Amino acid sequence: MLNGRVAVVTGSTSGIGLAIARALAGEGADIVLNGFGEADGIESIRDGIASEFGVRTAYDPADVSRPEEAAGLVRAAQERLGGCDILVNNAGIQHTAPVEAFPAERWDAIIALNLSQAFHTIRTAIPLMYGNGWGRIVNIASVHGRVASINKAAYVSAKHGLVGLTKVVALEAAGRGVTCNAICPGWVLTPLIQKQIDIRAAEKDLTEEAAIVDLLAEKQPSKQFATPGQVGGLAAFLCSPAADQITGQELGIDGGWSAQ
Ligand code: NAD
């Protein structure tokens, strides 16, 4: 389905981004991986995707919280693999604290990565997409792009902003073969969430299993995690012809969280 398309997935050395990269490679897209980690581990991920799916892959170490590196990631994809047909803005971080105790430095870092990243990659990639008359932009927002929770001032603000940016870009691109959508996951078990489980276990003196039950019961009616693979499947669907007329949407994958 995506043979000959080049996909850039930010934050794809781990968790949801890696699952999205694998899902797009599974449909034949060439992949630019990005994110942090041990060089050996990243090389094995890159090589593994190339050989498992028979696609071209490249790794770019850009820190996409920096405007020039976010734009540079898109330009490098064009130079190394010949384009940027699919852009997935996935890299994100979290910090939890009440607003009055929220470090200003953490606010700036979360806004830079979870929101401004997408502005800088999109404004660089979209002229290429317009030139080809085809493009797919998928922003990994969160259920926290739709509703709020305590202690997440920066994350909720960034993700609401990302949903807003998604809608603006969708309107500007409408009718030009380019769609822009946001995926809004609830709890997905990844290293990012593991930290919150560990904090909860310590604060409430719970075992890890009990902390997971407690975490899910609080917000996610299905009481089950969504999986990175399910988010990858939705991203791949948004790149398929069936999704040609889906644009400007915030698509939940949250076990019913946002229906409450
Ligand atoms: P993760 O911590 O497993 O992965 C984050 C990825 O981003 C890693 O590859 C990391 O190396 C990379 N990264 C971090 N800072 C970066 C930077 N400055 N530049 C480039 N790459 C960077 O997290 P995850 O849970 O897979 O989260 C991925 C996205 O999904 C995030 O935007 C997150 O907000 C969103 N999300 C996650 C959940 C969840 O429950 N896990 C729920 C809703 C939304």
Image (cartoon, rainbow, N blue to C red):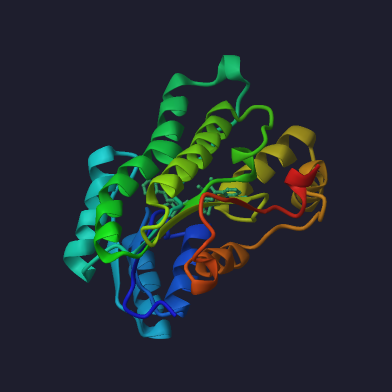
**Placement of 23 over or under 131, stated as above or below:** below
**Image coords of residue 95 (percent x, y):** 54, 33
**Image coords of residue 88 (percent x, y):** 42, 57
**Image coords of residue 93 (percent x, y):** 49, 41
Tally the marks: 0
The residue positioned 44% from the left and 41% from the top of the image is: 168
Residue sitting nearer the eye, 125 or 100: 125
**Placement of 230 over or under 181, stated as above or below:** below
The residue positioned 81% from the left and 56% from the top of the image is: 222
The residue positioned 47% from the left and 45% from the top of the image is: 166
Q: Furthest residue to the front?
A: 175
The reply to whether residue 137 is in sight is no
Quadrant housing residue 99: top right
Residue sitting nearer the eye, 188 or 251: 251
**Placement of 86 over or under 200, stated as above or below:** below
**Placement of 137 over or under 116, stated as above or below:** below
The C terminus appears in which quarter of the rendering?
top right
- Left of 53 or right of it: where is 201? right
The residue positioned 67% from the left and 49% from the top of the image is: 186
Q: Furthest residue to the top?
A: 100
Quadrant housing residue 75: bottom left
The reply to whether residue 245 is in sight is yes
